[in-house]
Amino acid sequence: MRSVVERDDLTAEARIRQAAITRFPAEGIEGTTIRAIAADAGVSPALVLHHFGSKQGLLDACDRYVVDLVRTTKTQAVIDGTATDSGFMASMYRIAPPVVRYLGWSLSRGAPAAARLFDELVAESERLLSAAEERGLVRRTPDPHGRAVVVLTMQLGFVVLREHVTRALGMDAFGMEGLMRITERQMELFGTGLFTPEAARETAQALDQASRLLAQEGPDGR
Amino acid sequence: MRSVVERDDLTAEARIRQAAITRFPAEGIEGTTIRAIAADAGVSPALVLHHFGSKQGLLDACDRYVVDLVRTTKTQAVIDGTATDSGFMASMYRIAPPVVRYLGWSLSRGAPAAARLFDELVAESERLLSAAEERGLVRRTPDPHGRAVVVLTMQLGFVVLREHVTRALGMDAFGMEGLMRITERQMELFGTGLFTPEAARETAQALDQASRLLAQEGPDGR
DNA sequence: TAGTGTCCTGAACATGCGTTCAGTCGTGGA
DNA sequence: TCCACGACTGAACGCATGTTCAGGACACTA
């Protein structure tokens, strides 16, 4: 297995962390052994514990590293002004693939650091959308917070389901070609909507109907 | 830990499977022990292997069970005619929470059975959207397949990120209240679009610009 | 009653795990 | 030159794991 390491002059500690970032999402927590990580990094198992204290310590360090990297990359994108909310996918392009994969794994497993990141991204998304609303760029909604959650979840879905998107599109979802294709389709959806105006009304009715249906029937097997 | 089991008159085999469906997403594959599953189901560890052959066999059986359940539920919804594409979330409501959680875990981990399901759902989504296009309910797109992938990924994002959506909304994302709230926001986005008409043009320009930017810069650390 | 097959168990085994520890090596300051 | 210290290793320990196996309990048939 080729590790994330591009330059071989990294610290042993950094090599260990990179190996862990690659291994953990692929093999799971218990499925990843300290011995395997050590072998990837070219060090002894004992050194892993010397630097990170325990397997849990290494996992926490990876969580912090990846989340901080994503956070600062995203923040930098906002500062640079390139990030409209639609620029989320683009910012992912600047992060090395194993890190993006770790982020998706981290989110899907509900790691505390990832949960904090999610909440921050919701807040930031809500702020950006509200600012865009003020400028007349984005439509108004009765539920700004809910909309921010929905939009962010839709974006992060591509991070978590990356593998399936890649397979279904026949191109790397986070490569340039795939990212452009996805963003273009997103802009169609977010720009003019999926439905035609006449269908939008019909859908609203169907939603009401479904609401009543669910209310009276109740769910199965709960 | 209370298992999925509602009625205690299930087969031992079924109890084992239900326990596994609850345990695997929570603890991971290696983190879930046969002894723990056996204890949940109230049987001996040996019986687990008697019925499923091995731990891997149990995992495969769970994958098949959950994927088949989702498949038939979704299919039934289409037959019943309640499922527009927007009805995806609603169909999830009919499936027991542990099964939905297992589905999300299964997708995020790239299980073969889940991958097959994903591809089927893409195909079905593409078919439904094209039919709706014919009837003038859905706008035309230069890339129907890409659009189907994008729409489905956006929907499944809620399944995989369920925990975070629940926390951010302050209500169970797949409970009735949360599901209605999410669907309403989705219908706003898909109905009229997120952007105002004047902003849609601006966004298209930004997309072009980003495209050129990415093309000349290239990514970091690849 | 004897035979047969299914569901099920307790005890045991070999393996691989996370972690510990005593100690080596190399470097830089007093 | 000596010392202190951080990076690093090899060997070992205790433990929990997946799996095996011989057999018990029970129902059903001849």
Image (cartoon, coloured by chain):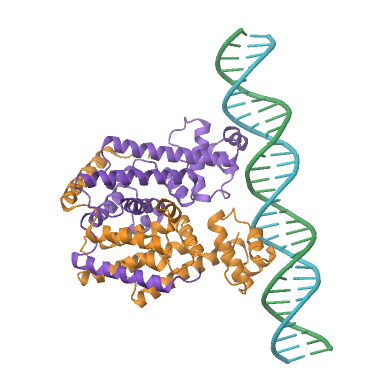
Chain colours: A orange, B purple, C cyan, D green
Residue A127 visible, this orientation:
no
Q: Position of residue B85 (x, y in %)?
A: 28, 46
Q: Position of residue A84 (x, y in %)?
A: 31, 70
Q: Name the residue nearer the viewer: A96 or D16.
A: A96
Looking at the picture, does residue A200 appear above or below residue A143? Answer: above
Looking at the picture, does residue A48 appear above or below residue A108? Answer: below
Residue C2 occupies which quadrant of the picture?
top right
Looking at the picture, does residue B215 appear above or below residue A204? Answer: below
Residue B157 visible, this orientation:
yes
Q: Name the residue nearer the viewer: A24 or B204.
A: B204
> What count of labels does the image hold?
0
Q: Name the residue nearer the viewer: B135 or B22.
A: B135
Q: Position of residue B201 (x, y in %)?
A: 22, 67
Q: Position of residue B204 (x, y in %)?
A: 27, 66
Along the horizontal axis of the image, is B152 left or right of A58? left
Along the horizontal axis of the image, is B96 left or right of B78? right
Q: Name the residue nearer the viewer: A109 or A157.
A: A157
Q: Residue at x 68, y 63 (%)?
A: A45
Q: Residue at x 53, y 32 (%)?
A: B12
Residue B150 occupies which quadrant of the picture?
bottom left
Looking at the picture, does residue B19 appear above or below residue A148? Answer: above
Residue A181 occupies which quadrant of the picture?
bottom left
